[in-house]
Amino acid sequence: MSELRFSAKNDEGTHLLLHDSQGAEFSLRISDTLRAMVNQPRLASVPEQESETISVKEIQRRLRAGELPDQLARENNVSLEKIERFSGPIVQERIYIIDQAQQIPVRKEGAREAVTLLGVVVSRLAPRNIDSADLSWTTWRHEDGTWTLELHYPNSTGHGVAQWSFDPTRRLLFSLDENARWMMGDEP
């Protein structure tokens, strides 16, 4: 497959003039489809010349803090592919933290085993016909080493959000908002 390079636009502005490495010229009509494809946010966010404006350490720090890869790429004039290349370990770490937080015992009922955060959340949402597959968890780390754990779940108004603070070193979990307190059965 030959690579074509842009040369110019025709006088009427209806066609792009292209050429290949052998000098052969081609004409491409500027259709509405082509115009829409070129104006997509994904293409607009990828710079033509990538400059090294952000270190790998900074990429990972900001991803760990919850920034989105496409936002990070746009703000720092780097390709999304570069950001994604270094995001794997961070994604795995965030999944691990979510799993650890979900397994924290939050309530002990009588002689039975303690109920975990995930168990409490599922038991609170099950009577509302919300399945655990409908839950979406995310997390991000703060400078002090604690994490915010955020749950998105469907409810009567569309979707609800509950947040907890999680300290993986001390294995402590605290409700940060009214929805999280309700899930835990805490008083407002």
Image (tube, grey):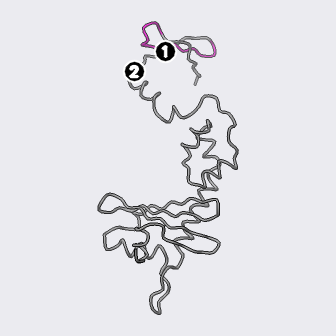
Identify the element where label 1 is drawn: strand
Residue 55 image point, x, y percent: 70, 44
Q: Residues within 10 Å of mark 2 (few under 14, many from 20)?
A: few
Q: Is residue 98 magenta?
A: no
Q: Residues within 10 Å of mark 1 (few under 14, many from 20)?
A: some
Residue 119 image point, x, y percent: 45, 76
Q: Amino acid at mark 2?
A: Ser
Label placed on residue 93: none
Q: Quadrant of the C terminus?
A: bottom left
Q: Amino acid at mark 1?
A: Leu
Identify the element where label 2 is drawn: loop
> What residue sits right under mark 1 in the picture?
16
Q: Earlier in the sequence, mark 2 or mark 1?
A: 1
Residues under labels 2 and 1: Cα distance?
Answer: 10 Å
| 64 vs 2: above or below | below
The residue lying furthest to the left in this view is 156
| Magenta segment main secondary structure | loop
Q: Residue at x 39, y 76 (%)?
A: 123
| 188 vs 154: above or below | below
Of residues 85 and 60, which is closer to you in this image? Answer: 60
> What residue sits right under mark 2 in the picture?
31
Q: Residue at x 70, y 50 (%)?
A: 57
Of residues 158 and 176, which is closer to you in this image? Answer: 176
Q: Residue at x 56, y 54 (%)?
A: 66
Q: Quadrant of the N terminus?
A: top right
| 36 vs 71: above or below | above
Q: Residue at x 56, y 62 (%)?
A: 95
Q: Is residue 33 left or right of residue 4?
A: left
Where are the magenta residues, as a range? 10-22
